[in-house]
Amino acid sequence: MVHELGHLAAIRALGGRVGGIRLTAVGAVISPKRERLFSYRAECLTALAGPAASFLLALAAGTWGRWFGSEDAYLLTGVSLVLGLFNLLPAAPLDGGRAFQAVVSRLAGPDVGERLEGALTWVLGFLLFCTGLWVLRRCGNFTLALCGAWLLFRRRGE
Protein backbone atom coordinates (compact mmCIF):
# COMPACT_ATOMS: atom_id res chain seq x y z
CA MET A 1 0.00 0.00 0.00
CA VAL A 2 2.81 2.41 0.89
CA HIS A 3 4.54 1.60 -2.42
CA GLU A 4 1.43 2.53 -4.41
CA LEU A 5 0.90 5.66 -2.31
CA GLY A 6 4.39 6.73 -3.39
CA HIS A 7 3.28 6.55 -7.04
CA LEU A 8 0.05 8.43 -6.26
CA ALA A 9 1.91 11.18 -4.41
CA ALA A 10 4.33 11.61 -7.33
CA ILE A 11 1.50 11.80 -9.87
CA ARG A 12 -0.21 14.50 -7.81
CA ALA A 13 3.04 16.39 -7.13
CA LEU A 14 3.80 16.47 -10.86
CA GLY A 15 0.38 17.92 -11.67
CA GLY A 16 -1.29 14.72 -12.82
CA ARG A 17 -4.62 13.26 -11.82
CA VAL A 18 -5.52 9.63 -11.21
CA GLY A 19 -8.14 8.18 -13.52
CA GLY A 20 -8.42 4.80 -11.82
CA ILE A 21 -6.77 2.14 -9.71
CA ARG A 22 -7.09 -1.57 -10.49
CA LEU A 23 -5.87 -4.24 -8.08
CA THR A 24 -4.31 -7.34 -9.62
CA ALA A 25 -2.72 -10.50 -8.23
CA VAL A 26 0.74 -8.90 -8.50
CA GLY A 27 0.02 -5.34 -7.39
CA ALA A 28 -1.95 -2.31 -8.41
CA VAL A 29 -2.24 -0.63 -11.79
CA ILE A 30 -2.69 3.14 -11.58
CA SER A 31 -4.17 4.83 -14.62
CA PRO A 32 -3.54 8.57 -14.71
CA LYS A 33 -5.99 10.86 -16.45
CA ARG A 34 -4.30 11.87 -19.68
CA GLU A 35 -5.35 15.50 -19.82
CA ARG A 36 -1.74 16.10 -20.75
CA LEU A 37 0.99 13.55 -21.28
CA PHE A 38 3.79 13.28 -18.75
CA SER A 39 7.29 14.08 -19.88
CA TYR A 40 9.89 11.30 -19.83
CA ARG A 41 11.35 12.90 -16.71
CA ALA A 42 7.97 12.90 -14.94
CA GLU A 43 7.33 9.30 -16.02
CA CYS A 44 10.70 8.26 -14.59
CA LEU A 45 10.11 10.10 -11.30
CA THR A 46 6.62 8.62 -10.95
CA ALA A 47 7.96 5.11 -11.54
CA LEU A 48 10.78 5.52 -9.01
CA ALA A 49 8.47 7.00 -6.34
CA GLY A 50 7.02 3.57 -5.48
CA PRO A 51 10.38 1.92 -4.68
CA ALA A 52 11.44 5.09 -2.84
CA ALA A 53 8.34 4.82 -0.65
CA SER A 54 9.18 1.14 0.00
CA PHE A 55 12.70 2.11 1.09
CA LEU A 56 11.37 4.85 3.38
CA LEU A 57 8.98 2.35 4.96
CA ALA A 58 11.88 -0.08 5.45
CA LEU A 59 13.90 2.67 7.14
CA ALA A 60 11.00 3.62 9.41
CA ALA A 61 10.19 0.00 10.28
CA GLY A 62 13.86 -0.80 10.96
CA THR A 63 14.14 2.21 13.22
CA TRP A 64 10.96 1.21 15.05
CA GLY A 65 12.28 -2.33 15.47
CA ARG A 66 15.59 -1.09 16.86
CA TRP A 67 13.95 1.26 19.36
CA PHE A 68 11.19 -1.07 20.52
CA GLY A 69 12.61 -4.52 19.73
CA SER A 70 9.73 -5.54 17.48
CA GLU A 71 10.36 -8.63 15.33
CA ASP A 72 7.34 -7.71 13.17
CA ALA A 73 8.98 -4.38 12.38
CA TYR A 74 12.11 -6.21 11.22
CA LEU A 75 9.97 -8.47 9.04
CA LEU A 76 8.30 -5.40 7.51
CA THR A 77 11.79 -3.92 6.93
CA GLY A 78 12.88 -6.98 4.97
CA VAL A 79 9.68 -7.26 2.95
CA SER A 80 9.78 -3.56 2.06
CA LEU A 81 13.42 -3.75 0.99
CA VAL A 82 12.81 -6.81 -1.20
CA LEU A 83 9.72 -5.22 -2.77
CA GLY A 84 11.59 -1.99 -3.50
CA LEU A 85 14.63 -3.78 -4.94
CA PHE A 86 12.59 -6.20 -7.06
CA ASN A 87 10.55 -3.33 -8.48
CA LEU A 88 13.77 -1.58 -9.54
CA LEU A 89 14.64 -4.37 -11.98
CA PRO A 90 14.68 -2.83 -15.47
CA ALA A 91 11.97 -5.14 -16.83
CA ALA A 92 8.38 -4.55 -17.90
CA PRO A 93 6.01 -4.05 -16.11
CA LEU A 94 8.13 -3.26 -13.06
CA ASP A 95 8.92 0.30 -12.01
CA GLY A 96 12.56 -0.07 -13.00
CA GLY A 97 11.43 -1.05 -16.49
CA ARG A 98 9.23 2.02 -16.77
CA ALA A 99 12.06 4.28 -15.56
CA PHE A 100 14.58 2.58 -17.90
CA GLN A 101 12.26 2.97 -20.88
CA ALA A 102 11.65 6.64 -20.06
CA VAL A 103 15.39 7.40 -19.84
CA VAL A 104 16.28 5.50 -23.03
CA SER A 105 13.29 6.99 -24.87
CA ARG A 106 14.42 10.47 -23.88
CA LEU A 107 17.98 9.81 -25.07
CA ALA A 108 17.41 7.66 -28.17
CA GLY A 109 13.71 7.86 -29.03
CA PRO A 110 10.61 5.91 -27.99
CA ASP A 111 11.12 3.03 -30.46
CA VAL A 112 14.60 2.32 -29.12
CA GLY A 113 13.36 2.61 -25.52
CA GLU A 114 10.56 0.13 -26.12
CA ARG A 115 12.80 -2.37 -27.96
CA LEU A 116 15.56 -2.23 -25.33
CA GLU A 117 13.12 -2.58 -22.47
CA GLY A 118 11.53 -5.58 -24.21
CA ALA A 119 14.88 -7.26 -24.77
CA LEU A 120 15.99 -6.60 -21.21
CA THR A 121 12.71 -8.02 -19.90
CA TRP A 122 13.31 -11.27 -21.81
CA VAL A 123 16.90 -11.54 -20.58
CA LEU A 124 16.05 -10.79 -16.94
CA GLY A 125 13.00 -13.06 -17.03
CA PHE A 126 15.10 -15.91 -18.42
CA LEU A 127 17.88 -15.35 -15.87
CA LEU A 128 15.42 -15.17 -12.97
CA PHE A 129 13.66 -18.31 -14.17
CA CYS A 130 16.89 -20.29 -14.55
CA THR A 131 18.24 -19.06 -11.21
CA GLY A 132 14.87 -19.87 -9.68
CA LEU A 133 15.05 -23.44 -10.98
CA TRP A 134 18.48 -23.77 -9.35
CA VAL A 135 17.11 -22.39 -6.05
CA LEU A 136 14.12 -24.74 -6.31
CA ARG A 137 16.42 -27.72 -6.74
CA ARG A 138 18.73 -26.65 -3.88
CA CYS A 139 16.24 -25.25 -1.36
CA GLY A 140 12.75 -26.20 -2.50
CA ASN A 141 11.64 -22.58 -2.96
CA PHE A 142 9.91 -21.83 -6.29
CA THR A 143 9.32 -18.08 -5.81
CA LEU A 144 12.17 -16.82 -7.99
CA ALA A 145 11.30 -19.25 -10.81
CA LEU A 146 7.70 -18.05 -10.61
CA CYS A 147 8.81 -14.40 -10.86
CA GLY A 148 10.96 -15.19 -13.90
CA ALA A 149 8.13 -17.12 -15.57
CA TRP A 150 5.75 -14.24 -14.87
CA LEU A 151 8.10 -11.76 -16.59
CA LEU A 152 8.57 -14.09 -19.58
CA PHE A 153 4.90 -14.91 -20.08
CA ARG A 154 3.71 -11.37 -19.43
CA ARG A 155 6.13 -10.06 -22.05
CA ARG A 156 5.09 -12.76 -24.50
CA GLY A 157 1.45 -11.70 -24.13
CA GLU A 158 2.23 -8.12 -25.08
Image: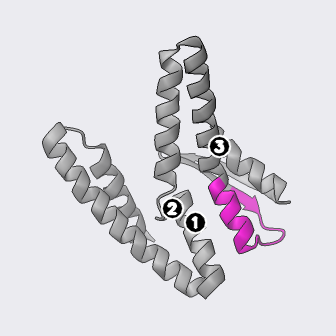
First reached walking from the N terminus: tag 2 or tag 1: 2
Could you tell me which residue is drawn at 17 percent across and 50 percent down? 134
Q: Is residue 34 magenta?
A: yes
Disc 2 is placed on an element classified as: loop
User: In which quarter of the view is residue 154 placed?
Assistant: bottom left
Comparing marks 2 and 1, which lies closer to the viewer?
A: 1
CB atoms of marks 1 and 3 within 8 Å:
no
**Residue 84 on image: x %, y %:** 53, 46
Q: CA distance from mark 1 to mark 3?
A: 16 Å
Binning the other alpha carbons within 10 Å of mark 3 as few (below 14), some (14 to 19) or many (20 upward) gives: many
Q: Position of residue 22 (x, y in %)?
A: 62, 49
Specify few, some or many for label 2: CA neighbours under 10 Å numbering under 14, 14-19, or 20 or more. some
Residue annotated with mark 3: 53
Residue at horizontal 63 percent and vertical 29 percent from the top? 60
The reply to whether callout 2 and callout 1 are in contact (CB within 8 Å) is yes
Front label number (1 vs 3) = 3
Question: Which residue reaches farthest front?
Answer: 67
* Mark 2 or 3, nearer chain start: 3
Residue 156: percent from left, percent from top: 37, 70
Q: Which residue is mark 1?
A: 98
Pointer 2: what residue?
93
The residue range painted magenta reads 31-48
Q: Is residue 109 visible?
A: no
Q: Is residue 13 left or right of residue 43?
A: right
Tag 2: amino acid = Pro
Taking 1 as reference, is 11 left or right?
A: right
